[in-house]
């Protein structure tokens, strides 16, 4: 029998991988592994830590903690889990996990001493206990049960949610579940390091509290963990005990942000690059290295992680660490970053004199400065011979002799260069003065025989989703109106008497690319192209554009004409100003503060800014480095850039944003006509830096064919029969998953390509319209969405509004909610696959908020999940699934009817049901059970204060409910046998959930 890949299968595989790298695992047999530890360490279901296990470990790790005082210590530690919000609690508990907790110890002479108590041994890995269990259930007002949890000494450090291909879910859904868990029971995540979301094919991880867009892959591994299976490699490389404790101790930042603090853990390339730097400093053989990471990968944080580790670990005895940037703007950005981070040992060199003072003093700390401040620093004054330098945008370090001045000021320092765009002008192994005068980043920062200390390429960035592919469109051969005859006549008149060769040389010397770009007819034609392209391709999805010009004069000319066409609110022009500028240039003068405000507004949507924001920036010599604006989709390039300058320009458009498929460059200079001349890099970098936009159209064609292929054999017309048959086909797996993921990608591609005449001429539009009809019907059937067309992207929504008969689809595919009327209506559906999808969705919608309100609802929810998994796994037919789901529905409606018939409100009926069905031997009769249930609810209403936010999970609520149950069950009804953790937690859930 073939085993169908399921969530349980993913779970078992993952536990097996963890078992192989040092975790004691429970649950590989398919059972609930958490039950093993629950029983062994007597955990109550409302607790998130195995306190008894932790108590044993604390005694083992700390001489000052004994059997006599460990109870007091654990009681104090439990209070540390109480926090007003998750991030505050997580930050404070992280201190306890990494530095220990203060505790007053009573000495034999009666005195007390404050000591630090370690919860984890970060020095000797083997002194800790590492447990991985599945199905760890926690009940605190509501109940959650993540798929896998990792515990260090009984403390939950990692929470994992998994999805299988037999479900209509993937890692995106797993992230949504994790975020819901954080909201429902933040206490579980207060000690947490990060979360993992995975499905059969992919894995993502994110720091506790991180939004979905910051869940990222871990796509690299040291040799001992390398695997062809990417998920297995990621689990082994990321979640081995040594790496977990290294990340926990040395790679966590907390950042103050306007919308709330954030926890930051490293990306894999940051983690491995930092460790490569630490190893090189520790070895002491070479004193330099190049970190070549593509733009957008987070080089700033790589430097900050490296600085923190160099200062806090025993890599060097007393290092002074320098981060050197090349502009005041980058210095300000890094200073603001540092001011908001939990990195304490740092200062900024505010002037040349201050920098010299800091070098002379030699204090072990991080010093932030610009390269230009070394211009007048005296040589041979350093007070610390363990200086370690990290230069951002390493190619700039080599300009104007600044590198020599730095070398003389910090003689013998270790120097690491960081760049996404290394300069390779001179030969790597040059010896003659002419070649040595040319800049070469690899020659400057790499020991002989080494190309880089660590590399993260453009291709890796695109594959990981950190950056987007960029496509170019050539517009350099556009036609513009010139009076050629008149021009020839004027030229011959002015330069008569000169030979043909002399005339050619005169043209070559006089007519530069800049002057050509400033010819008015050409600018007029380019502006028309930009205006039309922006309206058709960029504006519909609310993206923005940037016009890059070769001179301030041409920027002003573009600005005038674009403002004339689009209005002053839509266009801003940015370049440097001088006092003697002509009026053409002077009209767009801005000071530094004004430019900052323009840039800030450009990065926002009108809705975010609550005002009109600029849609097009026209720039000269600005914003081509260090400018991250995900909203920027298209660059209109009218400047001849090459090599690292071109790579930096490309990177302005490749920042990801929701719904953004790619960046785009419209090339008015012909830069991309010969990519080999424009980019002096390796073949892979050239291939992935920017691609012809025709390739994007080819991707769209391939994607349409793939999605249409799901419906082979079904007529591609707009009839009810064809739509029914198509929806039925994608009601079960694998077609359901293929369509859901395939259409998501297809919609993004269509939004990126349209409008394009080939969409019509090659029949793509017609196929896309048909698929949109199926998507609308599918969403109504599987998600109960009454108007799915409203959630589609702008160009797609326009297609639907003009070409898809929504009223007809609504008639054929109505949406329902659970109830007797619904059951009657669903009988009218002819298609059993569609019927099963409708019932499954409506049943889940009805049960989800009620699962913890009554024991029957939980059992029924588990039955629905089982039926749907068997149906989507082809174990039962469509008609069988319909009958099984209808049976569940009848029982759901029966629960509510029975409560009404017996005259019980929800909480009382839930407790009564539990007593009579889950523990029938504990009470004398149904009447006795009803009396107990009624008394519990009555006392709950009298004694528990519910008039404030957070009452459900407040410790006072939890304690008072326990007292109520003791009074009712033990004192009043002699039912002490019911008093156990599971019963108490369950009844508390019924009370809280039914009084929401």
Image: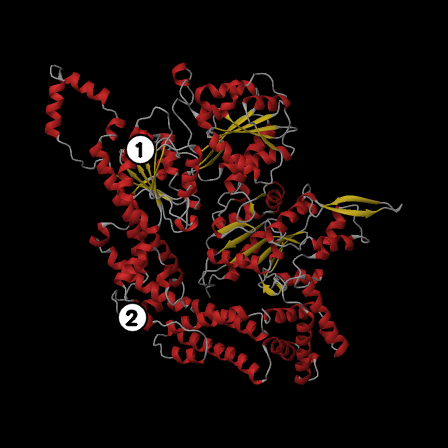
Q: Is residue 426 visible?
A: yes
Lower position in the chain sequence, tag 2 or tag 1: 1
Packing grade of label 2 (10 A; few <14, some 14-19, many >=20) is few
Label 1 belongs to which residue? 555
Residue 994, placed above or below residue 261: below
**SS label for mark 1:** helix
Between 117 and 945, the residue placed more toward the observer is 945
Quadrant containing the C terminus is bottom right
Q: Position of residue 758 (x, y in %)?
A: 22, 50
- Residue 214 is tagged as none
Residue 924, placed above or below residue 62: below
Image quadrant assignment for residue 576? top left
Q: Is residue 229 visible?
A: no
Q: Position of residue 659 (x, y in %)?
A: 38, 51
Q: Position of residue 167 (x, y in %)?
A: 46, 63
Label 2 belongs to which residue? 808
Question: What colour scheme governs how the chains and residues are painted in the rendered image of this protein?
Answer: secondary structure
Q: Disc 2 to disc 1, how far (Cα)?
A: 52 Å
**Left or right for 494, reference 87:** left
**Left or right for 600, reference 686:** right
**SS label for mark 2:** helix
Between 512 and 199, the residue placed more toward the observer is 512
């Amino acid at each position: 029998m073939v085993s169908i890949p399921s969530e349980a299968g993913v779970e078992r595989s993952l536990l097996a991988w963890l078992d192989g790298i040092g975790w004691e695992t429970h649950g590989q047999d398919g059972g609930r592994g958490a039950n093993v530890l629950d029983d062994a360490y007597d955990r109550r279901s409302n607790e998130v830590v195995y306190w008894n296990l932790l108590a044993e470990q604390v005694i083992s790790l700390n001489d000052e903690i004994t059997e006599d005082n460990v109870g007091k210590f654990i009681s104090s530690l439990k209070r540390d889990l109480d926090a007003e919000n998750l991030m505050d609690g997580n930050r404070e508990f992280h201190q306890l996990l990494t530095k220990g907790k203060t505790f007053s110890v009573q000495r034999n002479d009666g005195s007390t001493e404050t000591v630090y108590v370690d919860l984890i041994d970060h020095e000797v890995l083997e002194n800790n206990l590492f447990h991985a269990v599945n199905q760890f259930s926690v009940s605190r007002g509501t109940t959650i049960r993540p798929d896998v949890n990792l515990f260090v000494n009984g403390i939950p450090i990692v929470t994992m949610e998994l999805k299988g291909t037999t479900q209509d879910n993937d890692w995106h859904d797993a992230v949504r579940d994790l975020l819901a868990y954080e909201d429902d029971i933040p206490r579980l995540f207060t000690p947490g390091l990060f979360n993992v979301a995975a499905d059969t094919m992919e894995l993502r991880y994110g720091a506790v509290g991180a939004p979905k867009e910051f869940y990222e892959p871990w796509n690299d591994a040291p040799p001992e963990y390398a695997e062809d299976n990417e998920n297995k490699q990621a689990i082994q490389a990321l979640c081995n005990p040594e790496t977990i404790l290294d990340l926990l101790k040395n790679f966590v930042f907390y950042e103050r942000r306007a919308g709330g603090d954030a926890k930051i853990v490293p990306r894999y390339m940051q983690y491995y690059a930092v460790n490569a730097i630490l190893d090189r400093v520790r070895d002491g053989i070479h004193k330099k290295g190049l970190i070549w990471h593509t733009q957008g990968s987070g080089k700033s944080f790589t430097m900050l992680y490296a600085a923190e580790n160099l200062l806090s670990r025993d890599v060097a005895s007393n290092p002074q660490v320098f981060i050197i940037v090349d502009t005041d703007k980058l210095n300000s950005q890094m200073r603001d970053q540092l001011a908001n981070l939990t990195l304490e040992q740092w200062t900024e060199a505010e002037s040349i004199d201050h920098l010299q003072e800091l070098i002379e003093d030699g204090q072990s700390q991080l010093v932030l400065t610009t390269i230009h401040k070394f211009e007048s620093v005296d040589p041979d004054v350093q007070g610390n011979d363990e200086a370690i330098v990290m230069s951002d945008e390493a190619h700039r370090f080599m300009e104007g002799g600044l590198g020599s001045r730095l070398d003389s000021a910090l003689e013998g320092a270790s120097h690491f260069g960081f760049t996404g765009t290394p300069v390779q002008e001179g030969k790597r192994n040059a010896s003659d003065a002419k070649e040595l005068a040319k800049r070469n980043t690899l020659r400057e920062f790499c020991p002989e025989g080494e190309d880089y200390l660590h590399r993260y390429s453009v291709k890796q960035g695109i594959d990981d989703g950190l950056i987007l592919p960029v496509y170019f469109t050539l517009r350099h051969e556009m036609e513009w109106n010139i009076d050629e005859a008149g021009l020839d006549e004027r030229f011959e008149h002015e330069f008569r008497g000169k030979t043909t060769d002399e005339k050619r040389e005169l043209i070559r010397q006089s007519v530069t690319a800049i002057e050509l770009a400033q010819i008015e007819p050409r600018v007029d034609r380019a502006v028309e192209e930009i205006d039309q392209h922006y309206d058709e391709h960029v504006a519909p999805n609310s993206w923005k554009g940037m016009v890059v010009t070769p001179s301030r004069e041409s920027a002003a000319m573009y600005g005038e004409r674009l403002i004339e066409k689009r209005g002053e609110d839509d266009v801003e022009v940015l370049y440097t100003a001088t006092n003697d500028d002509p009026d053409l240039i002077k009209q767009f003068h801005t000071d530094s503060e004004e430019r900052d405000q323009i840039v800030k507004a450009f990065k926002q949507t009108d809705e975010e800014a609550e005002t009109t924001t600029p849609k097009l920036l026209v720039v000269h010599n600005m914003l081509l480095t260090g400018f991250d604006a995900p909203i920027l989709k298209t660059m209109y390039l009218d400047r001849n850039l090459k090599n690292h300058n071109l790579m930096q320009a490309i990177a302005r458009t490749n920042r990801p944003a929701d719904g953004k498929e790619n960046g785009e460059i419209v090339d008015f200079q012909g830069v991309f006509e010969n990519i080999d001349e424009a980019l002096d890099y390796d073949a892979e970098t050239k291939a992935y830096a920017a691609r012809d936009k025709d390739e994007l159209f080819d991707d769209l064609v391939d994607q349409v064919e793939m999605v249409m292929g799901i419906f082979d054999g079904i007529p591609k017309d707009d009839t009810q029969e064809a739509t029914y048959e198509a929806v039925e086909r994608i009601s079960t797996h694998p077609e359901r998953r293929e369509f859901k993921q395939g259409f998501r990608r297809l919609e993004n591609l269509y939004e990126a390509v349209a409008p394009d005449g080939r969409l019509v001429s090659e029949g793509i539009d017609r196929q896309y319209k048909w698929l949109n009809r199926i998507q609308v019907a599918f969403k109504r059937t599987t998600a109960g969405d009454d108007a799915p067309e409203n959630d589609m992207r702008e160009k797609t929504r326009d297609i639907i509004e003009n070409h898809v008969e929504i009223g007809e689809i609504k008639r054929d595919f109505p949406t329902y909610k659970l109830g007797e009327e619904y059951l009657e209506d669903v009988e009218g559906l002819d298609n059993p696959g569609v019927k099963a999808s409708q019932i499954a969705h409506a049943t889940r919608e009805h049960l989800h908020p009620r699962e913890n309100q009554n024991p029957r609802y939980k059992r029924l929810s588990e039955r629905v999940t089982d039926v749907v998994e068997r149906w989507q796994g082809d174990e039962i037919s469509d008609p069988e699934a319909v009958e099984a789901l209808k049976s569940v529905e009848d029982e759901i409606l029966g629960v509510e009817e029975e409560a009404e018939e017996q005259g019980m409100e929800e909480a009382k009926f839930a407790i009564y049901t539990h007593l009579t069905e889950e523990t029938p031997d504990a009470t004398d009769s149904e009447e006795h059970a009803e009396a107990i249930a009624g008394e519990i609810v009555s006392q709950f209403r009298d004694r528990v204060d519910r008039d404030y936010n957070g009452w459900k999970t407040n410790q006072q609520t939890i304690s008072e409910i326990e007292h109520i149950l003791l009074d009712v069950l033990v004192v009043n009804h002699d039912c002490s046998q019911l008093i156990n953790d599971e019963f108490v937690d369950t009844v508390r859930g019924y009370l809280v959930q039914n009084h929401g």
